[in-house]
Image (spheres, helix red, strand yellow):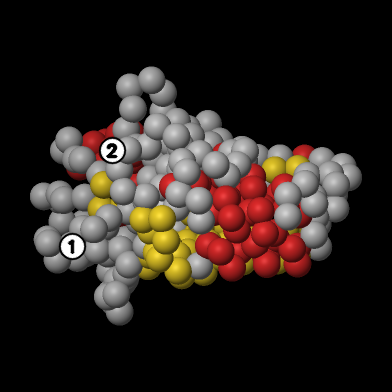
């Protein structure tokens, strides 16, 4: 699935506003007449976007995958889209069976705002030192305790495995890509907040690395706005299947 998360209260079902799960379940009910519960591979917060979210559900309906795609897109609002559909084994779990998630944070790094990117990037008008930001990313790769990037109120395990963390420039955009088994709440946005300070020379690379390894909750930040964050891809050992139902 792909969606613009600007007007949603995140991916997970909530009672206080529209969500991606809520809209998807509503579309499924209109199509099948069933009350279907949808699970999603990666939880995205309010205002966060997705290019490669994976959703799963069980149904008695027997439409071919092309029908699922076309019919759901008919019922879904224009800021949510189903990109492909597959029939899978009943034991497949989109969340538990995922091997990693890939996110990207977009920073518009120029003096003036971009009306076209206002919902999909955070404006930083001062020049960013991408080389220093990349040097700081070294502290993020591997299996570590990432408590420093979690909210101070988070009480579950803060140990995660990060496969990749890198910053690169693409003209006016500075892109931060991170891939991990899973992420703590606000982990990427707190990471970006710290990296921006490094890029503006308001924090040294050494200080960032020390804070990252401190194990003290809520140390790295501030939390970057949600609008710059996008779930790019969810990876699996054996999904999607080689044959798409069409």
Circle 2 packing at 10 Å, graded few (<14), some (14-19), many (20+), is many
Residue occupying the point 46% across, 41% down: 217
Left or right of 165 on screen, residue 153: left
Q: Does residue 179 lie above or below 149 as drawn?
A: below
Left or right of 9 on screen, residue 28: left
Q: Pick whichever of labels 2 and 1 is earlier in the sequence.
A: 2
Nearer the observer, 232 or 129: 129
Q: Position of residue 167 (x, y in %)?
A: 66, 64
User: Which image quarter: residue 226?
Assistant: top right
Q: Position of residue 86 (x, y in %)?
A: 27, 64
Left or right of 103 on screen, residue 1: left
Which structural element holds mark 2?
Answer: helix
Quarter holding the C terminus is bottom left
Residue situated furthest top in the rendering? 16
In 3D space, how far apart are the residues under numbered discs 2 and 1 (Cα atoms)?
A: 19 Å
* Mark linked to residue 92: 1
Left or right of 205 on screen, residue 60: left
* Mark linked to residue 24: none
Q: So how many labels did they put on this image? A: 2
Residue occupying the point 54% across, 54% down: 212
Residue occupying the point 11% across, 50% down: 60
Nearer the observer, 106 or 87: 106
Residue occupying the point 27% across, 75% down: 238
Q: Does residue 66 lie above or below 194 as drawn?
A: below
The residue carrying mark 2 is: 25
**Disc number lying in front (2 or 1):** 1
Q: Position of residue 214 (x, y in %)?
A: 50, 51
Nearer the observer, 200 or 116: 200
Residue 98 visible here = yes
- Marks 2/1 in contact by CB < 8 Å: the verdict is no
């Amino acid at each position: 699935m792909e969606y613009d998360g600007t007007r949603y209260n995140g991916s997970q079902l909530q009672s206080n506003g529209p969500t991606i799960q809520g809209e998807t379940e509503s579309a499924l009910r209109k199509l099948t007449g069933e009350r279907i519960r949808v699970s999603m591979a990666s939880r995205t917060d309010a205002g966060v976007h997705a290019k490669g979210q994976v959703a799963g559900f069980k149904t008695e309906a027997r439409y071919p995958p092309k029908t699922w795609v076309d019919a759901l897109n008919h019922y879904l609002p224009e800021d949510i889209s189903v990109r492909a559909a597959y029939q899978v084994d009943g034991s497949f779990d989109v969340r538990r069976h995922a091997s990693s998630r890939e996110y990207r944070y977009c920073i518009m790094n120029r003096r003036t705002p971009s009306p076209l990117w206002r919902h999909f990037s955070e404006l930083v008008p001062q020049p960013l030192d991408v080389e220093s930001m990349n040097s700081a990313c070294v502290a993020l790769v591997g299996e570590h305790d990432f408590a420093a990037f979690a909210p101070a109120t988070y009480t579950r395990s803060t140990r995660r495995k990060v496969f990749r963390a890198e910053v690169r420039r693409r003209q006016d955009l500075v892109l931060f890509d991170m891939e991990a088994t899973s992420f703590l709440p606000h982990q990427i946005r707190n990471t970006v907040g710290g990296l921006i300070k490094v890029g503006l020379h308001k924090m040294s690379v050494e200080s960032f690395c020390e804070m990252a390894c401190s194990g003290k909750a809520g140390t790295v930040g501030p939390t970057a706005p949600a609008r710059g964050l996008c779930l790019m891809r969810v990876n699996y050992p054996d999904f999607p299947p080689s044959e798409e139902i069409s």
